[in-house]
Every structure is written in C-alpha cells, then in structure tokens.
Image: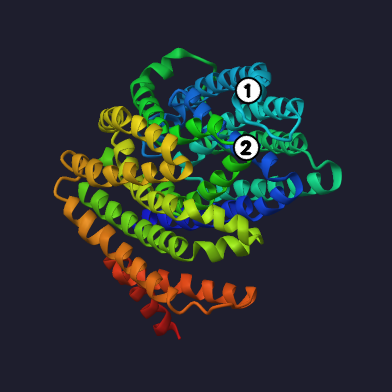
Amino acid sequence: MTGSDRVSVRLNVVANSLGMGWTTLMGLAFIPLYVNLLGIEAYGLIAIFVVLQTWLSLLDLGLTPTVSREMARFTGGGVDQQSIRDLLRSIESVTFIMAGIVALGIWLASGWLSTEWFRVETLPRGLVASALAIMGLVIGLRFVESIYRSSIIGLQRQVALNVVVSITATVRGLGAVAVLALVSPTITAFFLWQCVVSVISVCVLGLLVHRSLPGSTRTTKFSLEPLRHVWRFAAGALLVTFLGLMLSQSDKVILTPMLTLTVFAIYSLAYTAASAVRLLALPIDQAVFPRFTQLFQMGDELALAALYHKATQYSAVLLGSAGFFLVVFGREVLALWMQNDALAAEIYAVLWILTIGMVLNGLMNTPYYLQMAAGWTDLLVRVNAVMVIIFVPLIYILTQRFAVTGAAVAWVLLNVVYVLGVVRLMHRRLLIGEMRDWYMKDVAPPLLAAAAAALILRQLLPAHAGSIATLVFLGLSMAGILVASGLAAGIVRRELVGQLRIVLRRT
C-alpha cells in the first residue's frame, strides 16, 4: 500500500468515525424526547418503521452492495467512465421503480396492518394507518438514499458523504423534536418531517454522486446491458442479505403480533442501544472495503492480509470496549439516558444479552467485506441457508417460550456459530494461513482485556452517587476499558506507541 493509499484509508476511517458517531448520537439523543412527547406506545410505531425498512431493503435486489463494489472497481481502473455511468443510470431507474412499489404497497396495506397485525392499546387505528402510509413513502426514499450512499462509499468520497449525512441526521432529529413540541405531538407529524428530510437528502446525495463521476462521451440512459454484467454478484448479495435478515430479524416478525406496541417498543429500545455498539466497526469497514476491492483486483495478497488484520484489530478494540462497557454498566447508562429508572431496568434485562450478540456480529463485518471485495458470495449463501433451516425454528421456539429474552439468547447463539464457523470456512479460500492470527491476535486479546477491565472497574463504582458523579465515573471507565483493550491488540499498540513517540519528539 502506498503512502497516499494509507492516508486515504485513514482519512476515510476518521471521516466515517466522526460521521457515524455524530449520526448515532443524533439518533440516540432524541429517543427520550420522542418517548416523552409521543408516548411509549407511539414510539413502538417508530420501531415498526425500522423493522419494515430493514425487511423491505431486500427489494433493492442486491444493487446497493453491487454499486459500491463497481464504483470501487472504477476507482481502481477496472471499469471505464462510460460503463460506470450507464450502470448508475440503470440502477437508479430500477431503484426509483422499486421505491414507488414499496410506497404504494405499504399505503394499500396500512389499514389491514393497523387492525390485524399490530396489537394497539390506546392509539386510534386511523392514526396508526396514516402513520404507516407515510412510513411507506419514507422507506421508498431511503431506498434511493442507500444507492447513492453506497456509490459515494465506493468512490471513496467518504469525507463529503459524512458531512452530508451528519447535517441530515442533525436536521432530522432536531427538526422532529421541534415539530413535535411546537406544531403537532403526533406520530404522523413525526413521519411527515422524516419524509421532507429524505427528499432533501436524496437530492443532495444524487447531486454529489453525479458530480463525483467524470463526464461521459454520450447521454446515459437505462439499459439492461450494464445490469447483465453484474447480475450474478447482485443475486448473490441479495441472497446473502435475504438469508441474513431471516436470521437477524425473524425475532421481530415473531414478536410483533405477540407483544403490545408498548412492550415491543421496550425491546426495540434495547436493540437500538445494543446496535450502537455494532455501528462502531462500520466506519473502518466502509473505509477499507474499496481498498480491499482494489488490492484483490491487483493480486497484492500481502497488503490485503496486512489491511485485513489491522482493520479487524481496530474493530475488535472498539467493539469490545463499548460492548463490555454496556454489558457491565448498561443499567447506569440507561438510567442517565432515559431519566427513568423503572424503564431502564426493563430495557437492561434484555440489553446486556443483545449487546454480546452485537459484539460478535460486528466482528464478522471485516470477513464479510473481504468476501464481497473478492466477489465471493457463495459461502455466505450456503452457510446462511443452513443456518436459516436450523436457527429460524430455534428463534421461534425460544421467542414463543421466553419472549424477548428468548429472542436475545437466540441472537447470541447465532453469532457464536458465525464467529466460530464462517471465519474458518472463509480462510480455506481467502488469505489462507491467516485464520489463527485472526482469532489469537486480532480478536481474543482486545476482547478479553476489555472484559477484564470492565469487571474490575465495576467494583469501583460508587454507591448512591449523583448523576454528575456517575457520569464522570462512567466516562473515565469507558476510557480505561478502551486503553486496556487497545494495549492488548498488537497492531493498535504499536501504532499508538509510534504516534506517542512522534508527539514526544515534537515537544
């Protein structure tokens, strides 16, 4: 890897970290306000929106990861400028059509869903149906957003992307609170605001993508020809996504008709908080994926292996530190966040289990992106197909018997199998001989160090401390866990020591 390539990857990691961090903060910070302004039952509809958006993402037909990979190949010289523009125009056309189908379909089904599927207690059925109809339009718009975001990631314009995404997240959150507080404290007003912001986001991201590409020699138009060249990879990515959703989202489909919107909202709050841990690895993976693609295309296995281990160690440090912090101190964090001790206790009962699953799931991101960079979707398709046969019935049984606790335990068991099985299978074909280092050097040391540090610091937590003192202690504890985990990871430790020596020489 050249010096400029290293700078590019580092810059993208920093930009992604700042952008993802700010977006996650905006997403989490306003949740207590949403609950207070709308009520916990109405917040349950926001949780339903997330579930619908996740499942209906299948209708992108695998084009989201495909366009990212092709844009990365374009930056590496594997695709010419006319071909990439033709592909983008064709994918845009398909995406807009599918977005319209989604919006229309949810609107038509909104009445039936509000009366037959969801267990509503106090909200008017008409209000629920109206909210669902607007949800459909927002989900359709986010389809288009995802295509443009993936394109920008592949083009490695991730600094610009994160500026746009951070501003959008701020406007989306602050604006929603303002609308609810000053205009109308209803769930329909909330989703109408989301719709307005999504329209603006689609326009800005679309303009950024098209301006990032060089001019074409002729007018671009929709054609099936560019899609024929990528259909095999897109189909594989679609199958991976579909089977992955069957495994990761079946619990919510099973729980939705079983639980009232209030109880489902509590489970979703725990899932949202736990998911924030998994998001910590995404900035790294988004930054290295285009570089993985380029290195694989160039056949530079040494550089590919070095970047793979480095990305894994940094991910393990972040995931392990935040994950075990939340497992050990989650009740205190939730109490400060929600300002409601009773609600915090209900959420924490399932949060700590979900968080362990999220740490394991996040560790699989780097191996996943390596397979996508190699264009190898067969492994995950086969593995996920077998896992669906085994785990979906298990998820159903555990969820039916133990409700939200059973769903959380199933999530952990699923990811244990992934970490112990998929990585071993992958390294039989990709980066042969690197598996032992992945387990013994990249993953185990930072996770064990984070867990040990969290448990030790837990014993020092002052009893009956005030909010400010607790907040300060939690901040220092998170820093201590992060340092312990970082020092246990060889590559991270060497880079930190190297940077420290540079700073000391300058001073």
**How far across and how far down the image is residue 78, in percent?**
35, 33
Looking at the rendered structure, the kind of residue marked 1 is Leu
Residue 455 appears left or right of 172: left
Residue 281 vertical position relative to residue 221 in the rendered view, above or below: below
Residue at the far top: name it. Answer: 224
Where residue 49 sits in the image (x, y, percent)? Answer: 61, 34
Report the residue marked by disc 1: 113
Element type where label 2 sits in the image: helix
Along the horizontal axis of the image, is 91 left or right of 96?
A: left
- Extreme-right residue of the structure: 183
The one nearer the camera, 464 or 247, is 464
Q: In this rendering, does residue 381 appear at all?
A: yes
Q: Which residue ends up furthest to the bottom in the rendered image? A: 507
At label 1, counting other C-alpha atoms closer than 10 Å, the crowd grade (few under 14, some 14-19, many 20 or more) is: some
Residue 20: mark: none
In the displayed structure, does residue 26 sit left or right of residue 246?
A: right
On the question of residue 299 being in view, the answer is: no
From the top left corner, tell me how far across and down residue 314 is, in percent.
36, 59
The relative height of residue 61 versus residue 340 in the rendered view (above or below) is above
Mark 2, other Cα within 10 Å: few <14 / some 14–19 / many ≥20: many
Q: Earlier in the sequence, mark 1 or mark 2?
A: 1
Question: Looking at the image, which residue is at 48% across and 49% down?
Answer: 275
Quarter residue 439 falls in: bottom left
Residue under circle 2? 261
Tell me the amino acid under the disc marked 2. Answer: Leu
Relative to 32, say whether 100 is above or below. above
Confirm or deny contact between disc 1 and disc 2 (CB under 8 A): no
Q: Position of residue 393 (x, y in %)?
A: 35, 29
- Does 424 appear above or below 346? above
Q: In the rendered image, which quarter contains the C terminus?
A: bottom left
Q: What residue is shown at x 37% (from left), y 20% (from top)?
A: 231
Between the C-alphas of marks 1 and 2, the distance is 13 Å
